């Protein structure tokens, strides 16, 4: 089983839509979790950390289910500028990155 | 301005030549990392360093070497032993348990 698995997409959604990404991880000892965003041919940048109780940042909501070992990211009211690849990241001793889920938001 | 710099942004080398990629940070982070990203692939860890004068191999260290003589600097050498060196190379740094910050990356093309 891969350490961090994500659906590669692409997810094609219209502006204003709500879209959700899931990610599963294999190591139950993983300590912390993040979602990064990567624009085409750019470096990844932190979108948000994921806390056990779930957390929200504007239109973005992240949730963690330790029992099932999955992490989710919900984007509400999608904007054209949300088009990017979203990387699920899990920390044990070093960060392990998923391959990313591509989101394409169309007018 | 605090941050991570990588140079050059684009690098072209002939097959069989060693090449060194620069990474400098002024964030006062102890830990630094080198990743490689291929098209449509995730980031793969090459080497990392938790403290000056110490570093560990990541998942794909073969054909690469690093040094960490200063806290601010973590150069990566791509040697001729690396079979498929053309890729996007990303350097990152991180405080003890927080967010990892990335440099803008170097695109290496071996001709």
Image: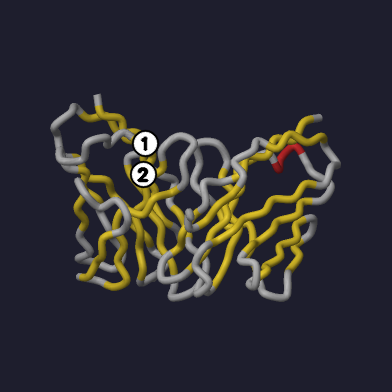
> Going 67% across and 68% down the picture, which residue do you hit?
A64
- Decide if residue B24 is on the left or right side of residue B111: right
Q: Secondary structure at mark 1?
A: strand
> Going 25% across and 51% down the picture, which residue do you hit?
B76
Asked if residue B1 can be seen in this view, the reply is no
> Going 29% across and 58% down the picture, which residue do you hit?
B47
The residue that mark 2 highlights is: B89
Q: Secondary structure at mark 2?
A: strand
The residue that mark 1 highlights is: B107
Q: Can you give x and y, in whole percent of width and height, for residue B88 in the image?
A: 38, 39
Subunit bearing disc 2: B
Q: Quadrant of the C terminus of chain A?
A: top right
Q: Which mark is residue B96?
A: none
> How far is disc 1 from disc 2 in space, using C-alphas?
6 Å
- Binning the other alpha carbons within 10 Å of mark 1 as few (below 14), some (14 to 19) or many (20 upward) gives many
- Binning the other alpha carbons within 10 Å of mark 2 as few (below 14), some (14 to 19) or many (20 upward) gives many
In the rendered view, tell whether residue B41 sits above or below residue A57.
above
Q: Nearer the viewer, residue A86 or B30?
A: A86
Q: Can you give x and y, in whole percent of width and height, for residue A71 in the image?
A: 65, 61
> Going 21% across and 49% down the picture, which residue do you hit?
B62
Task: Tell which circle, 1 or 2, labels the residue nearer the N-terminal end.
Answer: 2
Q: Nearer the viewer, residue A90 or B13?
A: A90
Q: Disc 1, disc 2: CB below 8 Å?
A: yes
- Decide if residue B46 is on the left or right side of residue B100: left
């Amino acid at each position: 089983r891969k350490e961090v698995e994500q659906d590669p997409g692409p997810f094609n959604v219209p502006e204003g839509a709500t879209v959700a990404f899931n990610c599963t991880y294999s190591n139950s000892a993983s300590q912390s979790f993040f979602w990064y965003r990567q624009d085409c041919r750019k470096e990844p940048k932190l979108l948000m950390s994921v806390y056990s109780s779930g957390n929200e940042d504007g239109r973005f909501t992240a949730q963690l289910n330790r029992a099932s070992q999955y992490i989710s990211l919900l984007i509400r009211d999608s904007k054209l500028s949300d088009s990017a690849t979203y990387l699920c990241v899990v920390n044990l001793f070093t960060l392990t990155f998923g391959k990313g889920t591509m989101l394409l938001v169309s007018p | 301005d605090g941050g991570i710099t990588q140079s050059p942004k684009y690098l072209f080398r002939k097959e069989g030549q060693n090449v060194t990629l620069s990474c400098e940070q002024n964030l006062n982070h102890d830990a630094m990392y080198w990743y490689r990203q291929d098209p449509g692939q995730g980031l793969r860890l090459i080497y990392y360093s938790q403290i000056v004068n110490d570093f560990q191999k990541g998942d794909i260290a073969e054909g690469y070497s690093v040094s960490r003589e200063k806290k601010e600097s973590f150069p990566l050498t791509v040697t001729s032993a690396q079979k498929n060196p053309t890729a996007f190379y990303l350097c990152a740094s991180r405080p003890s348990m927080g967010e990892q910050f990335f440099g803008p990356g170097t695109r290496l093309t071996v001709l």
